[in-house]
Structures are given as C-alpha cells and as structure tokens.
Amino acid sequence: MNAAEAPHAGRRDRPARPEEAIIEPGPLLNDPAQADAWADVLVRHGLLHAAVRTPAGPWLVQATQHSPVHLLEDAGLLGLTAAIQQHRRTRITR
C-alpha cells in the first residue's frame, strides 16, 4: 500500500483528548511563574475545570467537574498546556 492509498497518510497518531498527550519536559517547562500564569488562563477560559497549586509545589488539575484529579509538577502543567494548544490548533485548521 502506498502513501496515497493509506487512509491516514501523513498523519501522526494523536491522542483523542489533550490530557492523554505526553509532552517531554524541557528546560523552559520548569518555570513556576509560567505554570501559574497558564493555570490561570486555562481555568479562566474554561479549558480546565480547576488547577490549584498545593503548598508543596505540585498542581492538582481537573479537566472537567466529574473527571479525576491529577497531580502535576510545573513541567506537567506546562506540557498539558502545550498539548491543549496543539489540540485546539489542529481542530481549528481542519
């Protein structure tokens, strides 16, 4: 089967939901100030139900009111932000 015959030619397998995406943390993804700012933006725009920093530093993040709560470090929250942005960009351009 060549690329033209493949039903999904040229497309990478993407997670069905942004919270299933795994983004490898890089040096810029470990900034607490960025994590604070993005958590506020994601909740304010309704892209996350809740994001609360714990006193120890990690985040409690909940995608919807009835979804499970996840514990994320700053890098995990910023990775989730990147995944949500990528998901929204691919949905908008289709």
Image (cartoon, rainbow, N blue to C red):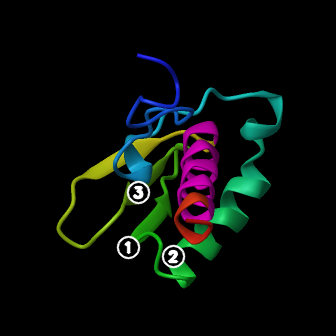
User: Residue sitting at 60 percent across and 42 percent down?
Assistant: 79
Q: CA distance from mark 2 to mark 3?
A: 10 Å
Asked if labels 3 and 2 touch by Cβ distance under 8 angstroms, the answer is no
User: Residue sitting at 72 percent across and 67 percent down?
Assistant: 37
Q: In which quadrant is the C terminus drawn? A: bottom right
**Image-based side of 93 in relation to 16, left or right:** right
Labelled disc at residue 61: 3
Q: Choose the circle earlier in sequence order: 1 or 3.
A: 1
Q: Return the x and y of residue 69 as percentages of the image width and height.
A: 28, 53
User: Residue sitting at 44 percent across and 39 percent down?
Assistant: 14
Q: Is residue 49 one of those drawn in magenta?
A: no
Q: Which residues are magenta?
A: 75-89
* Residue annotated with mark 2: 43
Q: Farthest residue toward the right?
A: 28
Q: CA distance from mark 1 to mark 2?
A: 6 Å
Q: Return the x and y of residue 84 as percentages of the image width and height.
A: 54, 57
Asked if labels 2 and 1 touch by Cβ distance under 8 angstroms, the answer is yes
Helix or strand or loop: what does disc 1 sit on?
loop
Q: CA distance from mark 1 to mark 3?
A: 8 Å
Identified by mark 3, the residue type is: Val
Q: Farthest residue toward the top?
A: 1
* Residue annotated with mark 1: 49
Give whichever of 41, 83 is nearer the camera.
83
Q: Return the x and y of residue 47 as percentages of the image width and height.
A: 47, 72
